[in-house]
Image (cartoon, rainbow, N blue to C red):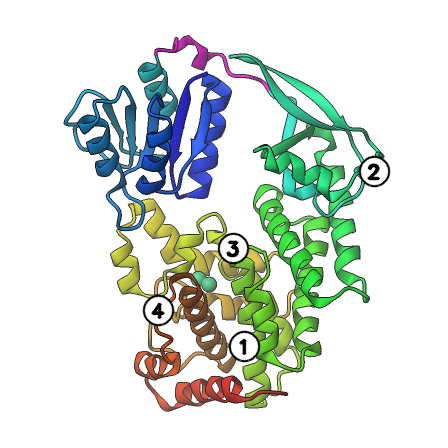
Amino acid sequence: MAQVILVEDNKVLNDLISINLTSYLNVDVIHRKNAQEALGLLSILPNIDLIITTAKVMDEPTAEILSHHIASNKLDTGLIVLGSSEKPTNDFTINIANPKDWEAVVHGSARILGINEDIIARKPIPDYAPLPIRYLLNLDSVNCDVFIRIKKSPTEYQFIKRIHNGDTFSKESIMRYTEQGLENFYIDKDAYKNFTIFLSNRLVEKMDSPKMEITQRIQIMGESYEIAINEISRLGFNSETIQLTESIIQNMVNNFQKSPEMSNLLHKVINSETQLLFQRCHMTSVVASEMVNNLKLTDPQAHNKIAYASFFHDIMLADYEGFSKINSAEELDKANLNDDDREMVLNHAREAAVIIRKLPDTPLGTDEIIMNHHGTFNGVGFSNSIEKLSDLSKVFIIAHNFVLHLILFKEKGGEPRPITEELYKRYPGPEVAVIIKALERTLKKKTK
Ligand SMILES: [Fe+2]
Ligand SMILES: [Fe+2]
């Protein structure tokens, strides 16, 4: 079996390319994060057939480093560079400008690996729907048969039943599949909807159980958040995704109200083993709610509105976690995105506000907070003139800035610097100053 190294930091693209490479070409895909890691593997496995890499990972000229390594060591490894439209300067490289064009990636790989391209015309017809393995981590039984997929020939799969409808199983037995590198189980396509109903009910039951310890509750909320966001983008709102969403939001509000110390709760969230997007969402809701209390705002729905806004404000960027960290027009320019991605970032606040209006029982005014979360009235682009926005929008913007700062500090390390000074400069005006002061007070205060 041919061995291929894949270096692609966009999770969606990474999945798309790996699934198609393994489905069509029956190759072994090995994931590496950057040039350094790929070189590490090449030193033990110099016979790797092909490397597929994004042109750059952050500031690292990944493709250039790898190309240089292949040339200077006279390796037989082919190279496919994603996101480069330049003409290759050697004969072992293929450049593909649009990395989403997975068919071009499969064709290019077939050519380098000497695989007959006819294969690509014969697409497999799946009757099964993939189910991320982590979906089963919070269950101990399922309401349908669960299969794993095995390759029989380059164009044929075999589905082998691993869990019978109604069987019980342990979390450890599910984790063993992940440890073996498996990403998906499969279930009958027609069973998918019933399965999500079953899963949502179980997660809601767990989250709503009063006995659960907070760390464990945060863990389940994080897993549920991931599932809810995934299923909302697949199926839209239905009674299950709505029920799941409401339960997570209610738990965010409860966690806040039950925790005597804000810093303690933030600590638990940021150290939980959950996705960054969930951590940011929960922390923003906690900090903003604390500021609302500190400012003595009288809106009885304030905490709810804030929790809903935290959950949904970046939903359009759920698959592009990096983009959700872009927080100003300058940062957007620096990110050097292609036109489609740039549009997506510019419009994500407006689009999320439109989506949430379709969700029944959302507290009135949540859409406005979402629309304003990067400072503009209409939810397009970024602005620092936020004086005239509503108090809740201003609170949300300041809390959102603070949490992003905290997350970046956790990721990158370095000297901790007081964010409030920067915020006074960035958002001038007396009305915003009152809000930033409230953040300062909440950060100083130890107990409620
Ligand atoms: Fe955000
Ligand atoms: Fe955003």
Residue 315 percent coordinates (x, y): 51, 55
Confirm if mark 2 falls within 8 A of ligand 1. Answer: no
Check whether the beta carbons of the residues at disc 1 and disc 4 lie within 8 A of each other: no
- Earlier in the chain: of badge 4 and badge 3, it is 3
Neighbours of disc 1 within 10 Å: few (<14), some (14-19), many (20+): many
Question: Which residue is label 4 attached to?
Answer: 414
Question: Which residue is label 1 attached to?
Answer: 288
Question: Magenta stretch: dominant SS?
Answer: loop
At 34% from the left edge and 87% from the top edge, which residue is drawn? 429
- Label 4, label 3: how far apart the Cα atoms are: 29 Å
Residue 122 visible in the current orientation:
yes
Q: Secondary structure at mark 3?
A: helix
In the rendered image, the vertical position of residue 361 relative to residue 287, given as above or below:
above
Q: Amino acid at mark 3?
A: Ile
- Label 4, label 2: how far apart the Cα atoms are: 47 Å
Magenta run includes residue 353? no
Confirm if mark 3 falls within 8 A of ligand 2. Answer: no
The part of the image, by quadrant, that contains residue 446 is bottom right
| Residue extent of the magenta highlight | 114-125
Q: Is residue 390 left or right of residue 447?
A: left
